[in-house]
Image: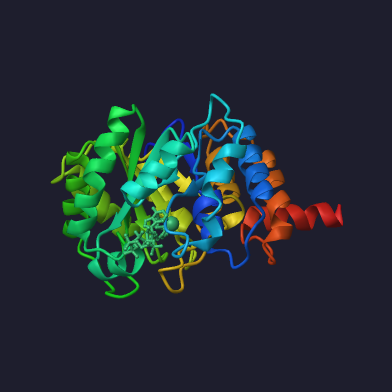
């Protein structure tokens, strides 16, 4: 009897979130020029999207308070998009003044997390995003919508997938063309990924092309979750070089799935990404001394250990 692996996409678009999701949660303030160098190296590695920073309140996220200076220092490659997070019109105005061409707005599927993260209800966040998204569209900018706590909330526990669907519909209705489904605290297991994607694509009739997945690797399930998502047709996956990251408003959230670990798995399965894994390792090696700890990427750690013993 022949066993056949379920179909997998021929290529995956890797969305690098390390300079934003990673550095927003590092305890140290990384110098602006090192952030610019990190972003430059990641783009040069072939990453099609490098989320560069956030135009949020500097009191909420002091680590990214140099957002305008970071954007000013990037020499953009035509092959890479450099989106930023924007929570409100003030952030949008700052982003536009910094020459940003692509943004992401962010809310969640659970009320308590949304309150802690952006001090709003989910409904209020959607109202605040509406004119921001309309302005971005008039400016011809791409807009991504993040939904956090899709698979669990640090304050409320389980999250009903129908709550995810309701937020997804509201974001798509305001003209957002890509949704990233966030496992903010890294609790998801593959069966949950199946359940949420099946609901969004089935009852929600949301095309798979509009969905991306964003796993934090807190409990070591991120790659298993990615594999199930790929088998369901997802071909856009978020990750963070070195496994940097977490979320300051989600206690216990560890780093994002590491870009190196994701690339190693994808390339090993014959899935194209257009990204040079060794160049991502080099970018992580550049930023590592500024973090005060070893990056958590398993591939990175194995790579560095073998170059010491070689
Ligand atoms: P607030 O305090 O309710 O807002 O914060 P406010 O409108 O009352 O403003 C308070 C002060 O902040 C004012 O200054 C504003 O001008 C200023 P003051 O008059 O007191 O001097 N302010 C700003 N300054 C700069 N840029 C802005 C801005 N907006 C207001 N854009 C707010 C509400 C949303 C602003 C705040 O809570 C905030 O910035 N939160 C951001 C939190 C954040 O960035 N969290 C991490 C990103 S989400 C994430 O990581 C999850 C994700 O990775 C997916 C996943 O893993 O699930 C995306
Ligand atoms: Mg995140």
From the top left corner, tell me how far across and down residue 183 is, in percent: 37, 59
Image quarter hosting the N terminus: top left
**Residue 1 appears in the rendering:** no
Viewer-closest of 52 and 17? 52
From the top left corner, tell me how far across and down residue 22 is, in percent: 54, 56
Q: Is residue 261 above or below residue 155?
A: above
Q: Is residue 8 above or below residue 163?
A: above
Residue at point 28%, 28% (across, down)? 138
Left or right: 20 with respect to 1?
A: right
Q: Is residue 224 above or below residue 75?
A: below
Q: How many marks?
A: 0
Q: Residue furthest left?
A: 203
Viewer-closest of 299 and 289? 289
From the top left corner, tell me how far across and down residue 193 is, in percent: 32, 55
Residue at point 84%, 56% (across, down)? 308
Q: Quadrant of residue 142?
A: top left
Q: Quadrant of residue 30?
A: bottom right
Check the image and tell me how it is coloured.
Answer: rainbow
């Amino acid at each position: 009897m022949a066993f056949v692996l379920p179909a997998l996409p021929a290529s995956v678009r890797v969305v690098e979130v390390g300079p934003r999701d990673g550095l927003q949660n590092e305890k140290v303030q990384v110098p602006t020029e090192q952030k610019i160098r990190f972003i430059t190296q990641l783009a040069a590695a072939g990453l099609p999207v490098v989320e560069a920073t956030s135009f949020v309140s500097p009191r909420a996220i002091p680590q990214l308070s140099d957002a305008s200076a970071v954007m000013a220092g990037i020499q953009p490659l035509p092959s890479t998009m450099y989106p930023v997070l924007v929570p409100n019109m003030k952030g949008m105005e700052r982003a536009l003044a910094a020459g940003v061409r692509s943004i992401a707005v962010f809310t969640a599927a659970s009320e308590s997390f949304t309150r802690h993260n952006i001090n709003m209800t989910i409904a209020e966040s959607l109202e605040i995003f509406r004119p921001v998204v309309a302005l971005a569209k008039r400016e011809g900018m791409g807009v991504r919508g993040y939904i956090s706590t899709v698979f669990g909330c640090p304050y409320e526990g389980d999250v009903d997938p129908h709550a995810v669907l309701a937020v997804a519909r509201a974001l798509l209705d305001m003209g957002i063309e890509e949704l990233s489904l966030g496992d903010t605290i890294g609790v998801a297991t593959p069966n949950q990924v199946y359940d949420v994607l099946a609901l969004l694509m089935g009852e929600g009739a949301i095309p798979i092309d509009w969905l991306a997945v964003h796993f934090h690797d807190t409990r070591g399930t991120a790659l298993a979750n990615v594999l199930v998502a790929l088998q369901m047709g997802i071909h856009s996956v978020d990750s963070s070089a070195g496994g940097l990251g977490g979320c300051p408003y989600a206690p216990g959230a560890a780093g994002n799935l590491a870009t190196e670990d994701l690339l190693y798995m994808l390339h090993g399965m014959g899935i194209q990404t257009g990204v040079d894994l060794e160049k991502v390792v080099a970018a992580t090696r550049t930023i590592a001394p500024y973090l005060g700890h070893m990056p958590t990427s398993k591939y990175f750690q194995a790579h560095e250990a073998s170059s010491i013993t070689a």
